[in-house]
Amino acid sequence: MLVVKKFGGTSVANKERIFNVANRCVEEYRKGNDVVVVLSAMGKYTDELIDMAKDINENPPKREMDMLFTIGEQMSVALMAMAMNKLGVPAVSLNAFQVAMHTTSVYGNARLKRIDSERIRHELEQKKIVIVTGFQGINKFDDYTTLGRGGSDTTAVALAAALNADACEIYTDVDGVYTADPRKVKDARKLDVVTYDEMLELATLGAGVLHNRSVELAKKYGVTLVVRSSLNNEEGTIVKEGSKMEKMLVSGVAGDTDTARIAIIGLKDEPGIAFKLFNALAKSNINVDMILQSIGRKGTKDISFTVSEENADEAAAVINNNFDNFESVDVNKNVAKVSIVGAGMQTNAGVAAKMFEALYDENINIRMISTSEIRVTVLIDRENTERAMNAVHDKFSLGER
Ligand code: ASP
Ligand code: MG
């Protein structure tokens, strides 16, 4: 059996944790399995590297940032190989060059294209544990690239797919995927299983457990993931394709306060308005999330949409600088998104209504609504976020088994 095990920064943050991980991997190895380990940089080292860079140059070239980032993961894998060696087990560390993890050229946000598996296979045949740097790749210019923050999960899934692994385990500092953030919802419960689609929605909503491209990749290649803690022996959460029977009506509730609402009031009601508006925002690299357009009256209409909080002022500026066919633009940063996610929603009516009822019971006003096949999101006032999450979590009895 070939097992890929990925450990995040907190799992390798210091000497004890490194030996803890080494021991877990050696245990797997002693069962006679092939073990490939993917590591992140220790603790908050990637953040520290960013601080160091910004101290030198507040706008560092992206290529040089990637060059700098790669030392974080390289440090982890080398120390891990030393720890395993100390435990008397043959191990070898490999960086993105040595494996050859080919990516697109974009520094800071590259995508994996192809992984050469020969070197890893060769090392496994020599009965070594193979420890690979997460997060990094190389591009066609033979430069280092990185996959975006949190990208080591994606490295692990890509390796599992390339090596046709029998298992892909993502070790983190939480016990798995929860019905809601346990810091915000007191009876949040760990889920045994979530589907890829649910996990994707949750990842995008900021549940923060998995890099969302890792989930896309796992879905594409049918890699079953296990998300579990490196600090205990709990079972964790399995992420896989859902069978019809297992599909939960609602699996989780997510809250996201990194949002702001822009409202354009009294826009001229004519063809092409939405195109011109959102095209201008796209050209400024502003991602738009929820969109709401009012019914036109007296030749005008209102359009409102949400963006991440950091983009709010720029979005308003883009509109003010490029258009003059409206009355006013309003920016509201005092908002939050609360969402429910569940694969069973597609085939069941009344799920959204039940969510709205929970909010009504709490006298929480809904400002915007958007949905996908397996998600309902509402925009509410930010001070109500946790109350709304708890109310919805209760309404769907998510804390119960
Ligand atoms: N070390 C990188 C980061 O902090 C990659 C990762 O942890 O997955 O974003
Ligand atoms: Mg992570």
Image (cartoon, helix red, strand yellow):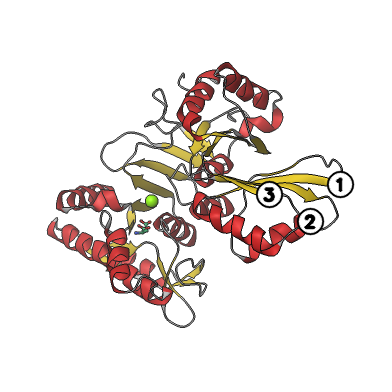
Residue 64 spot, x, y in % from top left: 37, 76
The answer to whether 25 appears left or right of 343 in the picture is left
Query: In the rendered image of this protein, does residue 237 appear above or below residue 187?
Result: below
Q: Is mark 3 within 8 Å of ligand 1?
A: no
Residue that numbered label 3 is attached to? 328
Of the numbered discs 2 and 1, the one sitting upstream in the chain is 2
Name which quarter of the figure residue 172 lies in.
top left
> Quick one: 64 or 326, which is closer to the camera?
326
CA distance for labels 3 and 2: 15 Å
Residue placed under numbered mark 1 in the picture: 299
Q: Residues within 10 Å of mark 1 (few under 14, many from 20)?
A: few
User: Does residue 116 appear to the left or right of 36 in the view shown?
Assistant: right
**Whether residue 84 is visible:** yes
Query: Mark 3, mark 2: which one is toward the viewer?
Result: 3
In this rendering, does residue 281 appear at all? no
Residue 182, placed above or below residue 77: above
Residue drawn at the location 70% of the way across and 57% of the way down = 278
Work out whether residue 206 or residue 216 is closer to the camera in this orientation and state it. 206
Between the residue at mark 3 and the residue at mark 1, the CA separation in whole angstroms equals 15 Å
Residue where numbered disc 2 is placed? 273
Horizontal placement of 199 versus 371: left or right? Answer: left
Residue type beneath disc 2:
Ile
Asked which secondary structure carries label 3, the reply is: strand
Cα distance between the residues tagged 2 and 1: 13 Å
- Relative to residue 113, is residue 233 depicted above or below? above
Determine the residue located farthest toward the bottom in the rendered image.
141
